Amino acid sequence: MNFKSIITYSFKQKFSPDFLFEGEGASFFYTYIRKNASTSFKKLFQELYTGVCPGELPSIACMAEHARVKGLTPAEIGQRFETKLFVYRDPIDRVFSVYKNKLIQQDGAEDLLKRLEKVVERDPGLLTFDEFVHEYVVLLETDRWEEVDGHLYPQVWHLLPITYNKVIRMDNVYREMQDLLPPELCGRVFKEPSNSTTKGSVSLPWADPDCPAIYFRNKYVQGKALPSLNQLLTPATEARLREVYADDYRMIEEVEGKTSALLLSASALPPGLDFSLPEEHNKG
């Protein structure tokens, strides 16, 4: 599946680097998007660039030092790299994954929780999923967007104004990456989802949208039980998230062939976030 973005987000390079993954007979351009199988791609980096970054998983800074693509125009990127890839997922599922992973499981959540507490001015454990969305995620539409953690930034903010010709839905990553990698390598890296919020957990039999994160935290500590999106997503919050991530949903419709064309709207950008059209578009 293909997707052509036409907007350059001027602050993209602060939170979404682009990489060249090369080795084992593979070579492709990859745009990093948090919460979109990003841990698996870190594992792939360690496989292809053996020994250059310490630890089981590399830091983004170390990856950038050794494999970041920079200094090229969109046109040059389009010409130089045959395969240009990003992974996408449903935006609401992505937001709920952040809520589960950071507020309930509290996996690597220290920075996010500190930032969240400063914004909402109370213990993040007291937040229901509805409150997490209506008091925090919605700031993405305002000039306070930078107060929101990067795991929640819309997926289209991460993209360059190029044609991506390998656009993969997250639940298809293993199958799609078999086109680019040797079978054994692909199996080691992508067959089992990495850093999944549901890995090793069980379903919580009962959950109510009015329950705060600390309630679910206690259930998780006691028995690895987690709530589902269906249990906590109210119609009002679903509608609000669809507004906040409208451009992501337009991107998905374009990728999956549900619409004939896509134009990301400047009105959907948060105040103060500059954008520009690629040069070839401006000439038109």
Image (cartoon, rainbow, N blue to C red):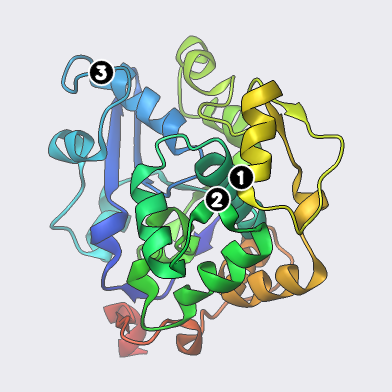
From the viewer's perspective, is the residue at label 2 or at label 3 nearer?
A: 2
Query: Mark 1 belongs to which amino acid?
Result: Ile
Residue named by callout 2: 125
Task: Report whether 223 appears left or right of 278.
Answer: right
Instruction: From this view, report whether residue 123 is shown above or below residue 107.
Output: below
Name the disc covering residue 55, or none.
3
- Which of the two labelled residues, at mark 3 and mark 1, occupies the earlier sequence position? 3
At mark 3, the secondary structure is loop
Residue named by callout 1: 214
CB-based contact (under 8 Å), mark 3 and mark 1 = no
Who is closer to the viewer here, 193 or 275? 193
At mark 1, the secondary structure is helix
Task: Report whether 88 appears left or right of 49.
Answer: right
CB-based contact (under 8 Å), mark 1 and mark 2 = yes
Return the x and y of residue 164 as percentages of the image width and height.
Answer: 45, 55
Instruction: From this view, report whether residue 80 is shown above or below residue 248.
Output: above
Viewer can see residue 23: no
* CA distance for labels 3 and 1: 31 Å
CB-based contact (under 8 Å), mark 2 and mark 3 = no
Q: What residue is drawn where x is 61% and y is 45%?
A: 214
Query: Mark 3 belongs to which amino acid?
Result: Gly
Task: Report whether 114 appears left or right of 182.
Answer: left
- Which of the two labelled residues, at mark 1 and mark 2, occupies the earlier sequence position? 2
Q: What residue is drawn where x is 45% and y is 87%?
A: 266
Say which quadrant the C terminus sits in. Answer: bottom left
